[in-house]
Image (cartoon, helix red, strand yellow):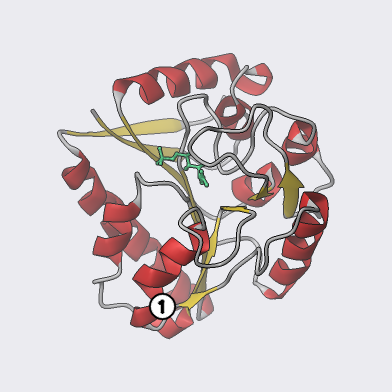
Amino acid sequence: MTEIEWWDYDDADEMAAAVAGDIQFIIESAIDARGSAVIALAGGNTPLPAYKLLAEAKLDWKKVTIIPGDERIVPLGDPLSNVTALAKIFLPKGARVKPIVPEATKDYKAAGRSADALMQDLHWPLDFCLLGVGGDGHTASIFPGPDYEEAIAGPKERRALGVMPEPLPPEAPVARVTLSREAIVTARAVMVAVTGQAKRDVIEKAIEQGPLSQYPIGRVLADVELPIDIHWAA
Ligand code: 6PG
């Protein structure tokens, strides 16, 4: 059973400040211990206030590499592009923000193989991975669909893969590239940040269901060795 600790906040701003502070500490610790930090950050909207606060931290940003934990297969600069949102916030601070899908393609499996190759030059395991969760229980871009089992239980050396969510999520109805479950859960620290009671209910049910959960977040977090902090605001 995964060791989960819920951290509850009165509002999203309070959560953003706490999440930013925790990530700052993790980055500082990684730089102290290994001379650099490689972190994967969730896409979507929930973590953006935390990212903006984190970007104000006094950190040795040139030693920090940021990748999106998943990416929509759209051109760089597209409003749906996760790395574009991260670059806007962190590039001006001197961080290295690394696209994992440098160009859009219809061949989403090829995009996944390309992302996997692009990430080989990073140091693994990741120092940190922040996960968001969708209302349907997806996390990163691990969704039900033809690539679901590969994302959850594929070859351990695969760190990224192309996925075609079925159904396509309405907020970003495009094929994706995602970190695999293995790449996520082998990070030195994994954190979840979500808001709203509905997502909390889904996550609590998913954790209770464990490895056979109907929700991707339940299957991803099942049997994780490290304790997981879940930051939540109503
Ligand atoms: C993505 C994300 C995804 C996101 C959830 C929650 O690219 O869509 O990485 O996993 O974290 O969909 O998104 P919100 O925070 O916008 O609700």
Seen at 73% across and 55% down, the residue is 159
Residue 186 vs 211, above or below: the answer is below
Q: Position of residue 116 (x, y in %)?
A: 75, 61
Classify the position of the C terminus by image quarter.
top left
Q: In terms of depth relative to the viewer, which is nearer, 188 or 180?
A: 180
Q: Position of residue 174 (x, y in %)?
A: 63, 44
Q: Is residue 60 visible?
A: no
Seen at 72% across and 63% down, the residue is 115
Seen at 75% across and 50% down, the residue is 161
Q: Say left or right for 188 vs 157.
A: left
Residue kind at label 1, given as amino acid type: Leu
Q: Say left or right for 132 vs 168.
A: left
Q: Is residue 208 visible?
A: yes
Seen at 74% across and 59% down, the residue is 105
Q: In terms of depth relative to the viewer, which is nearer, 160 or 156?
A: 160
Residue 96 vs 136, above or below: the answer is below
Q: Residues within 10 Å of mark 1 (few under 14, many from 20)?
A: some
Q: Quadrant of residue 2?
A: top right
Q: Position of residue 98 (x, y in %)?
A: 57, 72
Q: Which residue is mark 1?
A: 91
